[in-house]
Amino acid sequence: QVQLQESGPGLVKPSGTLSLTCAVSGGSVVSRNWWGWIRQAPGKGLEWIGEIFHSGSTTNYNPSLESRLSISADKSKNHIFLTLRSVTAADTAVYYCARVRGVGFDYYMDVWGKGTMVIVSS
Amino acid sequence: EIVMTQSPVTLSVSPGERATLSCRASQSVNSNLAWYQHKPGQAPRLLIYGASTRATGIPARFSGSGSGTEFTLTISSLQSEDFAVYYCQHYNTWPGYTFGQGTKLEIK
């Protein structure tokens, strides 16, 4: 049973860099899956951030975040990473990692972490 | 860009009754639609994928239907644990994954 656990600093200063880790257990990041990041700002809905393919060779990013975003993986640690630069208060949110499954255009997130809250404030 | 619109924003239903939630796509997404349940402080939970296939472990009272631009999530007999926010989601090569704005299902 795959389980995901997000971690990272709960507070980031404006214009700083947000760095989060997703630890994958019960499975491998090199299994043939995509691994994604999704966030939910306070009082808002879910927003897809981006994803990485198992080998780390391919990433897809939300166009609205792409210029500030990097997603990577460490196969030896079975971790997925999110780096978001030049953050503002609008990046305050609960950040989730998730396993992506599907075929063709039918892609969905079947396993989610419990999320980690990040507040951008001075 | 395909826009997913859910209705209603809030739905008030009594336990034991049926709840019907809608999701409309701005253009056809065939049957490529998923539904999630989200409770405060918890991870979102996949309910339905492929518009009508229940995910592993999801009770039979949850059903999904529709194709093209109109989709429905039906909960046949509401249990206390079903009161939550529900999201629909679609994937496309650009701009990626799109969620509806959510429907809050509350106790009447």
Image (cartoon, helix red, strand yellow):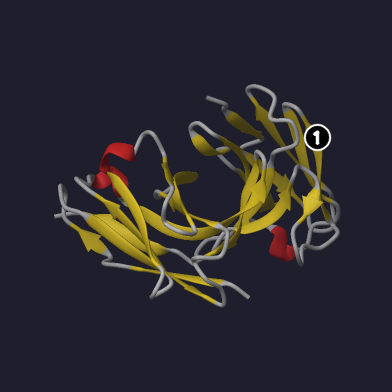
- Quadrant of res B107: bottom right
Q: Is residue A44 visible?
A: no
Across and down, in percent, residue A6 comes to: 41, 68
Residue shown at 61% from the left, 30% from the top: B5
Q: Is residue A48 above or below residue A82?
A: above
> Considering depth in this image, is A52 or A116 the residue closer to the camera?
A52
Circle 1 packing at 10 Å, graded few (<14), some (14-19), many (20+), is: some
Across and down, in percent, residue A74 comes to: 37, 67
Which element is circle 1 on? strand
> Considering depth in this image, is A48 or A55 the residue closer to the camera?
A55
Left or right, A35 with reference to A21: right
Q: Is residue A41 visible?
A: yes
Residue shown at 81% from the left, 63% from the top: B59
Left or right, B75 with reference to A120: right
Left or right, A64 with reference to A84: right
Residue shown at 66% from the left, 35% from the top: B8
Chain under numbered label 1: B
Across and down, in percent, residue B24 comes to: 68, 29
Across and down, in percent, residue B90 comes to: 62, 38
Return the residue at label 1. B66
> Considering depth in this image, is A98 or B37 the residue closer to the camera?
A98
- Quadrant of res A21: bottom left
- Quadrant of res B23: top right
Q: How many marks?
A: 1
> Considering depth in this image, is B24 or A33 the residue closer to the camera?
A33
* Amino acid marked by disc 1: Gly
